[in-house]
Amino acid sequence: MIPDCSGLMSIEQVRVAVNDDRVQGPDPLDVIEAPNVLGPAAQELFRSATELVGCTYGIPQTDGGFYVIVVAVESPAASEVVAALAVSDEYAHTTRGEVEMFSKDVPEGIGTHLGYAFAGGAWAIVQGTMVGPETSVNVAADAVTAVLE
């Protein structure tokens, strides 16, 4: 079971991950939809989710913010997406223990960064203007780890 936004990560944990004490949140997403940056296989995996939690964080009165969506998915389907991402030239790939992490720039609008983390049957998606290559995957990995505990 995926914890709600307040149980997923503490605000202190998020502030440390993004190295900014001004970050506020979490606020639950009113509607959780598949982000438009997902490729076809990831879109399909997202649609197969058995459980979803979405949260936003940001700095008030600025363009600085990001969201975290955590979905429960079937491990075999997630493994296929992980394998495809691992061979893609679009994504940087790292690991933290058993957590597979991927990130890429999304140059739309003012520019954002996208990070994924996969472990077991949990997948976290992080995207926003406040996260970069390392922070996006670190926040995603923290969220996935919270689900596994």
Image (cartoon, rainbow, N blue to C red):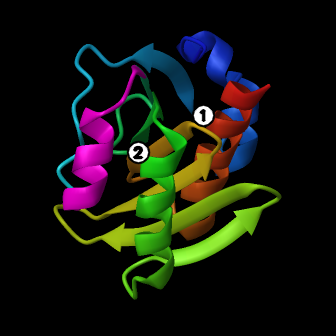
Which residue lies at the image location 64% right of the left edge and 60% below the top edge? 100
Q: Residues within 10 Å of mark 2 (few under 14, many from 20)?
A: some
The quarter holding residue 51 reads top left
Q: Residues within 10 Å of mark 1 (few under 14, many from 20)?
A: few
**Left or right: residue 54 compared with residue 8:** left
Q: Magenta segment: does it hold 47?
A: yes
Which residue lies at the image location 57% right of the left edge and 18% below the top edge? 2
**Left or right: residue 141 compared with residue 51:** right
| Residue 3 x %, y % | 60, 14
Which residue lies at the image location 43% right of the left edge and 61% below the top edge? 80
Mark positioned earlier in the residue sequence (2 or 1): 1
The quarter holding residue 63 reads top left
Q: Please identify the dominant SS of the magenta region.
A: helix
Q: Nearer the viewer, residue 111 or 47?
A: 47
Q: Magenta segment: does it hold 63?
A: no
Which element carries disc 1, helix, strand or loop?
loop
Farthest-out residue, bottom: 89
Q: Is residue 85 above or below residue 67?
A: below
Specify the amino acid type for callout 2: Gly
Q: Is residue 63 above or below residue 38?
A: above
Which element carries disc 2, helix, strand or loop?
loop
Which residue lies at the image location 16% right of the left edge and 61% below the top edge? 109
The quarter holding residue 113 reads bottom left
Name the quadrant of the N terminus: top right
CB contact under 8 Å: marks 2 and 1: yes
Which residue is labeled 1 in the image? 22
| Residue 140 x %, y % | 58, 46
Name the quadrant of the C terminus: top right
Residue 21 visible within the image: no
Which residue is labeled 2 in the image? 64
From which residue to which does the magenta span run?
A: 39-51
